[in-house]
Structures are given as C-alpha cells and as structure tokens.
Image (tube, helix red, strand yellow):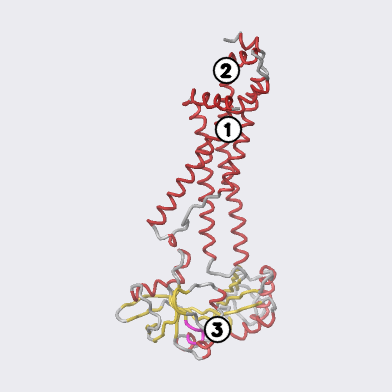
C-alpha cells in the first residue's frame, strides 16, 4: 500500500501544472459554496433580528379606516379605534389571550429637553404588559409597572439614542426630562438595538394613563398587542379576532383597509420558507460550480489513461491485475479531488474568518444587515465527502477503460 501511495504522490508531482489547474475548479467550487452558504445564513440571521423585539406568538392590531359600506351608520373613511372596554372584552372572549396591551402614539414628534440639550423623539403611551409582549431590553433601570399606571406617575422609559444625545452616554436614570412642556422622571433606558430597532431607540414610553392625562384627553387608541398562550394557533385566532372586531366596531370583516393585523408567528414562518428557497438556490449554484470541476477531473483522467497506455500495457504484461489498474486510476482521481476540496475548505474558513474580523473592528455590527458570515461545517464537510465520491465516479469510466486495455494493444501504441 505504501508503494501505491508513493506512486500516487509521484504521479501528482510529475504533472504539477495540470493537476493544479484541474484541482482549482474543485477548490474554487468548495470556496464559493462556503461563501454562498455563509452569506445566506448571515442574511437570514440579520432578517430574523428584525423579530427579536417581538415575542414569537404575538399579534399586533392596527386600526385603519372603513372603506366599504357595511350597512350601518358609519361612513366610509371613518377611522377604526379601540378603547379599554374593547380590550377587556377581547381578553374575556378569547381564552387564547394571555396578555393584552394598548399602544398610543403622539400625532407629531415630541421635543425632549434635558438641561440645554434637545432631541426629537416619538412619544408612546403603553400598558404595563407592553414590555412583556414587545421584548425591548433595558440596559439600566426598570420598565413601567402597574403602580405607575394606576397612580399616573410622570415616569418614562427612553431609547438608547435619546439617552446618548441628551447625556453623552451618561445614564439619565433618576433625572427629570422635559417632554413637550411636561416633566417626566426617567426610570429606564433601552439597550442599544440593531439597525431594525432604530424606531424604538428614538422613542419615549410613558404609561397609557399619563399619556392620556398630559398629552391626549381621548380614551381611544389605534394599536394594541396580544400575547397568545402556548400552543395557541395564531392563524385561527387572527381570523376569529377580525370577525369579532368587525361585529363589535361595525365594519365588514372582509374590509382589508379597516384593520391591519401583524401576526409575528406567520411572518417568521413566511421568512423561514423564503430562506429555505434561497438556501436551495445557493446549494444549486454551488453544486453547479463543483460539477464543472468534477467534469474537468473526469476529462483529465481520460488524458492520463491515454498518456499511460504503454505503461499500463507493461504492468499487465508483468502480471498486474485489472483491479490494481482500476485502483491506480481511481486513487489519483480521488487524491486530486480530496486535496483540492480540503484546500477550498481551508481557504473558505480563512476568508470568512478574516471577513468577520474586519466587520467586527470596522463597523458596529448592530448597524449592519449582515453582521457576520457563518460557517456551516456540517454542510461543507458533507459537500467535501460527496465531492470525493463524485471524484471517484468521475474517474470510474477512465479507470475501467484502462483496466480493460489489452497488453499487446497497449504495447503497440508506443
């Protein structure tokens, strides 16, 4: 066996340029496949960070405008709004509802002032369960609690960007800030989020009661969020909820402009299907490139067999079996494929590692859609194994042809 392996190494060294060019196609295919899979997984991770601030089994309902005549006193164009009694009825009507919270927005951006610095932000009034449905992490302080709502305490939670502008990254916890002419005490600061959470980082959150007292006397709002209990079907619940709200608020349940429902679970599932298709396409592209390399190996093996016909004739005249000739040609094919595949694998790991390092030191990864390229070792190693098998198959026909050569015929071809 040692003689056979030495012979393979000798043969590879004898035709360095040819073997390098042949193996380049295979190495390049593995390299490109790694980059495609790494970029695809990095893009998927970046997109799914969009949903990191939402509990998976949550639904957000946005009131629109009635666009179809439902045979009632409401005119087309009437805004659809909600109130506290409606939310109470929804929770009592549907056993699937675990938590429910309103969200009310100021119609215009608010001016926030601290000492001599100003910043513009989006003011929101929320319920006590808001931070349990929308997963906004706090870097410091606490969220709005039940006592804040009941007592209408002038307290607020501010976004990371607002805290950064007003205090140069010093914590504003315990400080009083002026929000459109009203003083509020800062009790919490949001953690710095990703590029998808810039809206939250420029927002101020106060209790729903404080908002209605200081900024809006109306007791209605156009947004509310629901967290469903485990094992509840968000798809079925969404249909039932829309039917219930249609009857309660006097609009046709088929009116697509009256109500907008964001089903986080459904959106996540849709993106998973999308990325499954993208990954399948990336695999197709990568394997297509690999196949071109495999075909090249098969062609080179045919050339090798033709060049070594006389040598094969001598071997067979000296008693070499067809099996040994078959093994010799197949071994060279597998050796080229395996060596090129490993080179492509190492090159891919090196480039992806370097790219991740450059991204880390040069950019704030929270501000990038693709913050890192992931290496799917199991997928790539599987590809290399399949590649070696393909290399053996590519060399099978030339090897079989070589093993069947007649010694007399081979010796006469010199």
Q: Relative to 151, does residue 180 appear above or below in the rendering? A: above
- Residue at 69% across, 81% down: 93
The residues tagged by marks 2 and 3 sit, at their Cα atoms, a distance apart of 88 Å
- What residue appears at the point 68 percent right and 77 percent down from the top-left corner? 244
| Residue 220 disc label | 3
Q: Secondary structure at mark 2?
A: loop
**Relative horizontal placement of residue 50, taking residue 172 as reference (left or right):** right
Residue 187 rendering spot, x and y as whole percentages: 44, 82
Q: Which mark is residue 70?
A: none
Mark 1–mark 2 distance (CA, rounded to whole Å): 21 Å
Q: Which residue in the structure is indicated by mark 1? A: 294
Position of 191 relative to 272 (above/below): below
Highlighted magenta segment, given as a residue range: 206-210
Q: Is residue 375 left or right of residue 255?
A: left
The local crowd at label 1, few if under 14, some if 14 to 19, many if 20 or more residues have their Cα within 10 Å, is many
For the stretch drawn in magenta, the main secondary structure is helix
Q: Say whether marks 2 and 3 touch (CB < 8 Å).
A: no
Q: Which residue is identified by label 2? A: 308
Nearer the observer: mark 3 or 1; the answer is 1
Q: Quadrant of residue 332?
A: top right
Q: Magenta span has 152?
A: no
Q: Quadrant of residue 317?
A: top right
Percent from the top left, x then y, of residue 289?
Answer: 55, 38
Q: Is residue 396 visible?
A: yes
Mark sitting earlier along the chain (2/3) = 3
Structural crowding at the residue carrying mark 3, measured as other residues with C-alpha within 10 Å and reported as few (<14), some (14–19) or many (≥20): some
């Amino acid at each position: 066996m040692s003689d056979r392996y030495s012979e393979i190494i000798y043969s590879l060294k004898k035709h360095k340029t040819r073997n390098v060019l042949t193996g380049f196609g295979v190495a390049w295919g593995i390299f490109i496949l790694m980059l495609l899979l790494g970029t695809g997984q990095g893009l998927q991770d970046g997109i799914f960070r969009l949903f990191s601030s939402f509990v998976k089994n949550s639904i957000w309902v946005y009131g629109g405008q009635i666009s179809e005549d439902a045979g009632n006193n409401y005119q087309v164009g009437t805004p659809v709004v909600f109130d506290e009694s409606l939310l109470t009825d929804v929770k009592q009507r549907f056993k699937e509802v675990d938590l429910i919270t309103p969200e009310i927005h100021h119609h215009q951006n608010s001016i926030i002032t601290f000492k001599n610095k100003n910043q513009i932000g989006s003011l929101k009034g929320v319920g006590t369960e808001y931070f349990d449905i929308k997963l906004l992490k706090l870097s410091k302080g606490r969220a709005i609690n039940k006592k804040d709502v009941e007592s209408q305490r002038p307290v607020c939670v501010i976004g990371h960007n607002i805290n950064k502008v007003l205090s140069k990254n010093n914590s504003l916890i315990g400080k009083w800030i002026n929000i459109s002419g009203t003083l509020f005490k800062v009790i919490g600061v949001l953690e710095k989020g990703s590029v998808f959470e810039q809206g939250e980082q420029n927002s101020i959150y106060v209790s729903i009661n404080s908002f209605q007292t200081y900024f809006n006397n109306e007791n209605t709002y156009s947004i509310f969020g629901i967290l469903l209990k485990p094992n509840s079907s968000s798809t079925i619940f969404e249909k039932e909820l829309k039917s219930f709200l249609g009857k309660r608020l006097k609009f046709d349940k088929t009116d697509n402009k009256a109500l907008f429902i964001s089903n986080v679970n459904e959106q996540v599932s849709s993106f998973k299907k999308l990325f499954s298709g993208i990954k399948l396409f990336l695999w197709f592209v990568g394997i297509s490139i690999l196949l071109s390399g495999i075909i090249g190996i098969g062609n080179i093996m045919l050339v090798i067999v033709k060049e070594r016909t006389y040598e094969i004739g001598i071997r067979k005249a000296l008693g070499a079996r067809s099996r040994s000739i078959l093994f010799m040609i197949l071994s060279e094919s597998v050796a080229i494929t395996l060596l090129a595949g490993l080179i492509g694998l190492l090159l891919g790991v090196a480039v992806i590692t370097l790219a991740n390092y450059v991204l880390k030191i040069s950019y704030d990864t929270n501000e990038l859609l693709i913050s890192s390229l992931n290496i799917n070792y199991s997928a790539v190693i599987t590809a290399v194994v399949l590649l070696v098998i393909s290399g053996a198959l590519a060399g099978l026909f030339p090897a079989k042809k070589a093993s069947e050569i007649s010694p007399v015929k081979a010796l006469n071809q010199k």
